[in-house]
Image: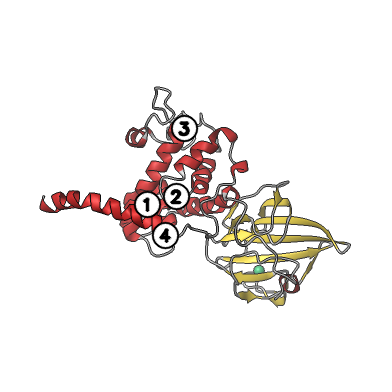
Amino acid sequence: MVAAALSLLLLPIVLVIGLFSQVTEPPETGTGSGGLNSGAVPEEYVKWVLKAGALCDEIPPAVIAAQIEAESGWNPNAVSFANAQGLSQFIPGTWATWGRDDDGNGTISPFDPGDAIMAQGRYDCALVDQVRPYANSGNLLDLTLAAYNAGPGRVQQYRGVPPYSETIAYVARIKSLMGKYEGAVGGGGKIPPGQQMAMPLAGNPQVTSPYGYRMHPVLHVRKLHTGIDFAAGMGDPMKAARDGEVTFAGWSNGYGNRVVISHGTLNGQRVNTTYSHMSAISVSEGERVRTGQQIGAVGSTGFSTGAHCHFEVQVNDGYVNPAPWLGI
Ligand SMILES: [Zn+2]
């Protein structure tokens, strides 16, 4: 009782401090997690995605948009077998808590896009606070998405992402889809000077297996390793090495989830890059991609013994060593 009364008394002070710290802190100029690639969002929903994505720092507009794509494919009338409804796929019980008449049309409905998207933002931000005690420095978003999929009680129970394949896949899918909804400007979109291609992963990843003949780790025969393996974590963004057009995006035996990008003709030769073993793919065939744009998420699908990035360069349809193209 006393503590509660005291915290009520302190509340105005905390608010005032909060206001001042907002004024004195420099604006965030990081890699653009706050930006929205509004061209990827159906026009009529852009304002709601931006509004819902401004409710808390941890849930930017790209997360809101990626969730809607995964939940309903942007269909405002979607109804699932479990009676999840609308763009954000609220079940009636959860809707009763979070739904409001945000679009001011006189009804509170999960089939009203504005009501649905804003309720989704409020629910996401509440989940952030519920899972924060179990988060480490880097996985607050993972835990929030896991809570959205499996319920915050499960995150609490396992003190992390619960070990359900559906939940793990959901987290990977959202993080993978986020790439196309993030603002196009930002770091990682440039080919370093003197190179033909940019790294398919953020930073300077370690090469765990180079191009060339080796004993195959799964098939146990001596075989040409047709690309470079980079160390990477499950769900890490995989990025286009150069501007191009997606010519394949799907399952390929051995390669698992694979994307092939055509970069057209360079110095008279047709050049493709390929990205394999992904846990999720976030582009589709025929799509134009830019250097550094996320095309999927690191995984271990196909013939693979653990999460990594297998990256290939094809010249006139034959495999070549990617190392020189990446400046390695
Ligand atoms: Zn490999």
CA distance separating discs 1 and 2: 8 Å
Please tell me whether residue 69 is drawn above or below residue 302 in the rendered image: above
- Report the residue marked by disc 4: 25
Image spot of residue 140 (x, y percent)? 41, 58
Between the residue at mark 1 and the residue at mark 4, the CA separation in whole angstroms equals 22 Å
Of marks 1 and 4, the one in the foreground: 4
The residues bearing labels 3 and 1 have C-alpha atoms spaced at a distance of: 21 Å
> Which residue type carries mark 1?
Val
Q: Position of residue 112 (x, y in %)?
A: 46, 28
Verify CB contact (< 8 Å) between mark 3 and mark 4.
no
Q: Are marks 3 and 2 in contact (CB under 8 Å)?
A: no
Name which of mark 1 and mark 4 comes first in the sequence.
Answer: 4
Q: Is residue 40 visible?
A: yes
Q: Residues within 10 Å of mark 3 (few under 14, many from 20)?
A: many
Residue at position x 59%, y 46% from top?
A: 37
**SS class of the residue under badge 4?**
loop
Question: Label 4 is placed on what type of residue?
Answer: Glu
Q: In the rendered structure, which disc, 4 or 2, sits on the residue that comes first in sequence?
A: 4
Q: Which residue is mark 2?
A: 59
Label 4 and label 2: CA atoms lie apart by 20 Å
Q: Earlier in the sequence, mark 3 or mark 2?
A: 2
Name the foreground residue: 41 vs 154. 41
Where in the figure is residue 77, as x and y percent of width and height? 51, 29
Q: Which residue is mark 1?
A: 128
Which image quadrant is residue 304 in?
bottom right
Q: Position of residue 78 (x, y in %)?
A: 51, 31
Which residue is located at x 72 percent, y 51 percent? 248
